[in-house]
Amino acid sequence: MELAASGPRVGTICTCGTEITYPEVYNTGVRPNERAAERLRYRAFRAAGLVKNIGGFALGLALLGIIFFPLALVGAVFGIYVLTMVRGPLGRYSGREQAVIAICVGTFVFVAEGSVLWSFMAQRRAERLSALQASGADDLRTLLRTERLFRAAQDRYGTLKESHFQPRSGAYTIYLSPDEYVAAVRDEQTITDPLPADLWPRVTNDAFTAVAVANLDGDAELDVWTVTEAGEVKHIANDVPWLPEPKELTRAEPTIDAMHGPEGPAVVVPIMPPVPPPQDKGKADKGEKAKAEKAAADKAASDKAAADKAASDKAASDKAASDKAASDKAASDKAASDKAASDKAATDKATD
């Protein structure tokens, strides 16, 4: 507000007895621009180094969080710091408006991008669990085919040891009896999942029942599959009920008779060879090197034997050719001698 002094002076007497006079002040009604004044004060504080634009810095971090996910939360934290910790004139000129915007933008970006990341991770986990769950049925179908091949050769069903069964994925513990099983391998660890008390896997000469058990998500529930000699694969316990059920749960595998006709197989089906156990990399490299050396030695011996045989065959051929040439020469000499004798006899007879 602009004030002006004019006219007579006004006086008063202090309690101490001193007379004080001052001019009479009038209000002219002229006021400066408050926005411009505030901007000038802000620039003055900034120029003097008394305040810093922390709110603007927080807003910049929040906007960068759109590209770099964690920075949105950092910008929101800086905005809260400006509103709560920087008070008085310093807080007034430290960018409170930008701090409020930074809090809103940073929180929204962090929540939105966090939701997208969470959904992506949940989808990846669901896909992994679905693949693991489907592998249980695949392992049991592999066991079913192995047992049928064993029976085609031996006229009975065999144990896991006799049939040399090896699961394809190995994520489930496969039971063919309460005491005979193939342990699961998950996360590079060998795990034996417990057999449910109400299930009794067994194998006889004419029938078998196998059970596949796994704990897919680490809780107290188990995922359980079963298969019988009839080829019916069933999913009797679901450890991850929020996922869709695998398709073709009860699809029956074709029997040996169905694959070869009603009269049975025309030939005896051989037993599947045992799958060698996994070895560590060093032993595998040494084994491969030994196999390569043995193959090279066998090839060299084979090449030497072939060369010796070729030389022997050539020598025999040369000898046969030489003998034939000698025989032909002897026959030719004999024929010439006989002809000469005949001519001489004819000449002697003509002379007489």
Image (cartoon, grey):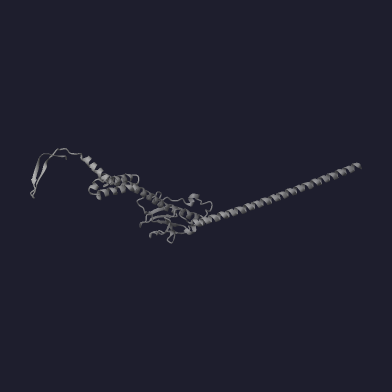
Number of marks present in the image shown: 0
Q: Position of residue 304 (x, y in %)?
A: 64, 53
Task: Identify the residue shown where x is 53% and y is 56%.
Answer: 287
Q: Which of 196 and 251 is in front in this view?
A: 196
Q: Which quadrant does the C terminus fall into?
A: top right
> Is 10 situated left or right of 86 in this image?
left
Q: Position of residue 259 (x, y in %)?
A: 49, 49
> Is 10 situated left or right of 31 in this image?
left
Q: Which quadrant does the N terminus fall into?
A: top left
Q: Which of 119 and 107 is in front in this view?
A: 107
Task: Identify the residue shown where x is 24% and y is 41%.
Answer: 40
> Is 252 situated left or right of 107 in this image?
right
The residue positioned farthest toward the front in the image shown: 18
> Is 287 situated left or right of 131 in this image?
right
Name which quarter of the figure residue 344 lies in: top right
Q: Position of residue 275 (x, y in %)?
A: 50, 55
Q: Where is residue 334 in the image (x, y as percent from the top left)?
A: 81, 47
Q: Nearer the viewer, residue 229 or 142?
A: 142
**Is residue 57 visible in the rendered structure shown here?**
yes
Task: Identify the residue shown where x is 58% and y is 53%.
Answer: 296
**Is residue 100 visible in the rendered structure shown here?**
no
Q: In this view, does 97 lie above or below 277?
A: above
